[in-house]
């Protein structure tokens, strides 16, 4: 294309962009939003008002949304970010890029980095590099910089991601590992391998996932060594080893060690190319040789292996769990066909199979939570017996008997209100969060307590759609769980029983690294 024509097209594009920025309709929408938001105090209406700025991209709207990132309501903050993510014009964000280059307080710098990253502004990469590379840069700035570069799809221009892999802050190391893996940085292999020995399991998990994408040969032996330890990381290492080498020995450490020593003795041996590995992966998929099924037969809950040593079982005891299953032939080995009886039986069998190496707790939920211990305890003989007593004592709240009482005019004794399904509250318990009284919204960075929580796996069983709680829309619940779990990295397995639409539980498992099982109708 001739240079003059390129210049003309660039001019026309910039003129169009300028016109869009000064569109009176967008400016008017922003002014009306500001007036409405100032007088509205109800959170639901505030969120709805923020969402009206979608499709009204202009600099004043972006300014207002950035200011809202310091709003005390987490819901308002998330809505502002959601709208900002739809803005893509460089002109809209150029003032923020310029501002990031100036001296300012670190929280403001971290907010700008976060916004520029979430909106994928490639032109902001040099400014993000500079802000996070300064000696005075806070952990929040460094954390948001790693996440921003990952979102933008650029490694930076100063080797920032590689440096952050050795950061003193665990959350920053974790974010950097996620970025290095997503961007497939070939020079990050050595630093990622070093993180296999990190003091925080979440950082180790992030490093394993990243190494499976970067595929350095030097990570194989350290992964085999890490796999000798018990816990969830064993299966993650096994999967990563397959993705690096193309071999599949599950969690059989000795087989891996023997094979690796044999391979290292072959002159010129190399790991397979991406194309060769893709063929092996397809063969593996076709034959259903999943890594967790080799070398050991762990205890399972509803057919999902309990490979973790830090487990929370969350089971539904709402009124509908008192209903009968429909597929009689599937449930002939239980004392009756009530959904809750089947769940009780499955959980009792699982508890029997635990040992002292596995720490666990149990939560039953309906409208409110019924928590067994409020901490993880070892699966020794005493705790297993106490757990089984707790599970046997449970029964559906507001079930068939309660409904009969209500029909007889004894509504007070029925407690039908207590037998609804508060799915959000049950799920967020794993993160130590009560949705009715959430912690103060973090504008930037992440909850440092996340990397101190040992819980790494949840088994969530339910038979119905959410019917009570702060959020009942399943897409909103999934979004809220993803928001917390980006840092906590808890695997969430889901089990469905009954006849309701089950896409929600399947998607919840898929988005949080878990397995979905449908017990039947």
Image: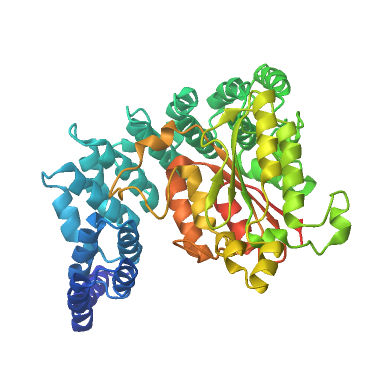
Among the 4 quarters of the image, the one containing residue 414 = bottom right
Camera-side residue of 116 and 340? 340
Camera-side residue of 392 and 182? 392
Camera-side residue of 98 and 13? 98
Q: Is residue 419 above or below residue 114?
A: below
Residue 14 seen from this side: yes
Which residue is at 55% across, 64% downward? Answer: 417
Residue situated furthest bottom in the rendering: 25
Residue 156 seen from this side: no
How far across and how far down the image is residue 424, in percent?
Answer: 50, 56
Q: As drawn, is 327 to the left or to the right of 411?
A: right
Among the 4 quarters of the image, the one containing residue 311 = top right
Q: As drawn, is 103 to the left or to the right of 283?
A: left
How far across and how far down the image is residue 295, in percent?
Answer: 76, 28
Q: As drawn, is 424 to the left or to the right of 90?
A: right
- Count of all numbered marks drawn on residues in the image: 0
Which residue is at 31% across, 43% downward? Answer: 445
How far across and how far down the image is residue 312, in percent?
Answer: 58, 40
Residue situated furthest left in the rendering: 103
């Amino acid at each position: 294309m001739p240079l003059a024509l390129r210049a003309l097209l660039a001019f026309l594009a910039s003129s169009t962009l300028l016109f869009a920025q000064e569109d009176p309709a967008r400016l008017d929408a922003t002014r009306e939003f500001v007036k409405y938001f100032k007088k509205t105090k109800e959170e639901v209406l505030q969120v709805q008002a923020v969402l009206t700025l979608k499709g009204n991209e202009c600099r004043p709207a972006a300014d207002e949304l950035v200011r809202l990132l310091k709003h005390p309501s987490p819901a308002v903050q998330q809505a502002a970010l959601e709208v900002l993510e739809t803005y893509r014009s460089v002109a809209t964000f150029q003032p923020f890029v310029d501002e990031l280059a100036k001296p300012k307080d670190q929280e403001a710098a971290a907010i700008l980095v976060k916004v520029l990253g979430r909106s994928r502004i490639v032109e902001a990469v040099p400014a993000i590099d500079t802000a996070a590379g300064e000696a005075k840069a806070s952990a929040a700035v460094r954390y948001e910089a790693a996440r921003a570069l990952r979102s933008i799809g650029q490694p930076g221009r100063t080797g920032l991601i590689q440096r952050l892999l050795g950061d003193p802050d665990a959350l920053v190391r974790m974010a950097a590992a996620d970025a290095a893996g997503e961007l497939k940085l070939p020079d990050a292999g050595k630093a990622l391998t070093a993180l296999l020995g990190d003091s925080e399991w979440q950082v180790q998990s992030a490093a394993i996932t990243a190494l499976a994408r970067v595929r350095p040969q030097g990570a194989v032996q350290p992964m085999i060594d890490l796999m000798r330890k018990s816990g969830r990381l064993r299966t993650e290492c096994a999967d990563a080893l397959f993705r690096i080498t193309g071999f599949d020995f599950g969690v059989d450490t000795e087989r891996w060690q023997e094979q690796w020593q044999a391979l290292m003795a072959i002159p010129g041996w190399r790991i397979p190319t991406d194309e060769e590995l893709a063929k092996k992966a397809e063969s593996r998929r076709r034959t259903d040789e999943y890594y967790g099924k080799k070398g050991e037969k762990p205890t399972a809950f509803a057919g999902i292996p309990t490979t973790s040593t830090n487990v929370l079982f969350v089971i539904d005891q709402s009124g509908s769990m008192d209903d009968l299953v429909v597929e009689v032939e599937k449930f002939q080995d239980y004392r009756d066909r009530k959904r809750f009886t089947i769940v009780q039986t499955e959980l009792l069998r699982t508890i029997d199979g635990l040992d002292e190496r596995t720490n666990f707790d149990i939560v039953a939920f309906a409208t409110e939570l019924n928590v067994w211990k409020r901490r993880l305890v070892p699966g020794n003989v005493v705790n297993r017996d106490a757990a089984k007593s707790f599970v046997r004592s449970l029964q559906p709240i507001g079930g068939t008997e309660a409904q009969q009482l209500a029909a007889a005019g004894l509504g007070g004794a029925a407690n039908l209100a207590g037998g609804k399904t508060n799915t959000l509250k049950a799920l967020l318990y794993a993160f130590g969060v009560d949705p009715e009284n959430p912690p103060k919204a973090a504008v930037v960075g992440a909850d440092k307590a996340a990397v101190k929580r040992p819980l790494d796996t949840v088994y969530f069983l339910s038979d119905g759609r959410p019917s009570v709680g702060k959020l009942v829309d399943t897409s909103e619940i999934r979004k809220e769980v993803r928001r917390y779990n980006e840092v906590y990295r808890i695997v969430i397995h889901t089990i469905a029983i009954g006849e309701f639409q089950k896409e929600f539980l399947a998607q919840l498992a898929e988005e949080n690294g878990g397995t979905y099982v449908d017990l039947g109708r």
